[in-house]
Every structure is written in C-alpha cells, then in structure tokens.
C-alpha cells in the first residue's frame, strides 16, 4: 500500500477518534486501537511498543481527567463533602435519562450530562447546607468541571492523533519530492 494512502487512512481514523471523543464516545481508545492496527500492518516496527505505551497512558489520563474534572472544581467551590460525588452521579444519570428530553443523538446526551451534573451537585449541596445560593454555585462549578474535563479529553485525543500521525510519517519514511 502506498505510504501516502496509509497515512491518509490513519489520519481519517484519528480524526474519527477525535470527533468521537468530542461526542463523549470512546475516541481515545479508538485512536489507540488505530495505533495497534497500524503497528500490526507495518510488522511491529522497532520503538512502537513505547509509542503504544504512551498512547495508552494518554488515553487513561484523558479518562481520569474527564471523570474527576467535575469533582475537583466542585471542591474548589467550597462544596460539602458529597456534592462532587453528587455531580458525578448526576452527570451519569443525566446522560442516560435526560437525553430523552432532547431527542437529538449525542447532543441530548451531552446536554443531559451537563444538566445532570449541575442538578446532582446543587441538590446534594442544598441538602447539606440548606442554602440555594451555595447550591447553585456548587452546581455551576460542577458543570464547569464537566466542560473542562471534556475539553481536556478532546485535547488529549488531538495530542494522541498528532503524535501517532507524526510517528507514522517518520516510520514510513515518506519523502516529499522537490519541486
């Protein structure tokens, strides 16, 4: 297969993985699977074990940051002990149940997760402290943490894609002809 065609296919797969990540699907894992398939296709080139390890570590890091982003910012808002966990649980439940309110695929899920994150943290904080203003503040920070975690995971997917494509171009030794 032509080197350019291989790199183009790899780029398309990485673009798909990044788009999947933005839509809260397992895009970072898709990019890692793309790297494994590329390695297999190229006959497991030297040094690819390190590259796959780095990509796997980046995928895990993206998952952790997305998962705890809401929790960390909720705690920064001086929330009660359980409000962050309420935001995380609310985000999960919102993604599942509130997505039916907006019947647009993926958009409804993301909006439901955002609303659930806000509501979960705000309700737990209100139950703990009986102050609407504090509950609203904590809910806002939980939703902001959700957005920051999601944006960070998309940045991780972009970095993974760029690293993989760069490594693949160097590995296939594609030479651009002089004009």
Image (cartoon, rainbow, N blue to C red):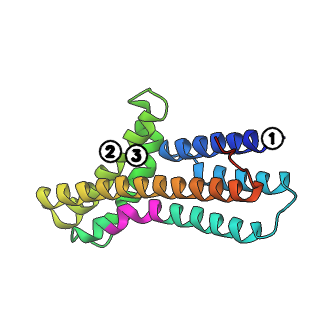
Q: Residues within 10 Å of mark 3 (few under 14, many from 20)?
A: many
Please state the horizontal and vertical placement of residue 176, each as a whole percent of the image.
Answer: 68, 47
Q: CA distance from mark 2 to mark 3?
A: 6 Å
Identify which residue, 160 or 80, lies in the foreground.
Answer: 160
Q: Give the label, 2 or 1, closer to the camera.
A: 1
Residue at 51% across, 61% down: 62
> Which residue is disc 1 drawn over?
2
Please state the horizontal and vertical placement of residue 46, each as a whole percent of the image.
Answer: 81, 69
Residue at 29% across, 51% down: 118
Residue at 48% across, 35% down: 106
- Name the side, left or right, on which 45 lies relative to 35: right
Quadrant containing the N terminus is top right
CB under 8 Å between callouts 3 and 1? no
- Residue 116 disc label: none
Residue 66 among those drawn in magenta = yes
Q: Which residues are magenta?
A: 65-72
Mark 3 lies on a secondary structure that is: helix
Q: Is residue 146 above or below residue 14?
A: below
Q: Residues within 10 Å of mark 1 (few under 14, many from 20)?
A: few
Quadrant containing the C terminus is top right
Q: Is residue 95 above or below residue 131?
A: above
CB under 8 Å between callouts 2 and 3? yes
Mark 1 lies on a secondary structure that is: loop
Where, by quadrant of the figure, is residue 82 drawn?
bottom left
Residue 120 among those drawn in magenta = no
- Residue 115 disc label: 2
> Which residue is disc 3 drawn over?
113
Please state the horizontal and vertical placement of residue 148, each as a whole percent of the image.
Answer: 36, 57
């Amino acid at each position: 297969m032509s080197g350019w065609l291989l790199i183009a296919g790899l780029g398309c797969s990485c673009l798909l993985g990044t788009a999947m990540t933005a839509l809260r699907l397992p895009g970072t894992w898709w990019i890692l699977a793309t790297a494994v398939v590329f390695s297999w296709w190229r006959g497991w080139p030297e040094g690819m074990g390190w590259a796959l390890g780095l990509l796997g570590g980046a995928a895990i890091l993206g998952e952790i940051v997305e998962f705890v982003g809401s929790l960390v910012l909720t705690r920064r808002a001086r929330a009660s002990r359980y409000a962050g966990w309420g935001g995380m649980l609310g985000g999960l439940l919102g993604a599942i149940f509130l997505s039916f309110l907006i019947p647009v695929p993926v958009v409804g899920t993301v909006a439901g997760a955002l609303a659930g994150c806000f509501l979960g943290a705000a309700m737990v904080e209100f139950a703990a402290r009986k102050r609407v203003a504090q509950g609203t503040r904590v809910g806002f920070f939980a939703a902001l943490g959700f957005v920051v975690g999601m944006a960070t995971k998309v940045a991780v997917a972009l970095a993974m894609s760029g690293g993989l494509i760069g490594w693949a171009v160097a590995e296939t030794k594609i030479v651009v002809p002089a004009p």
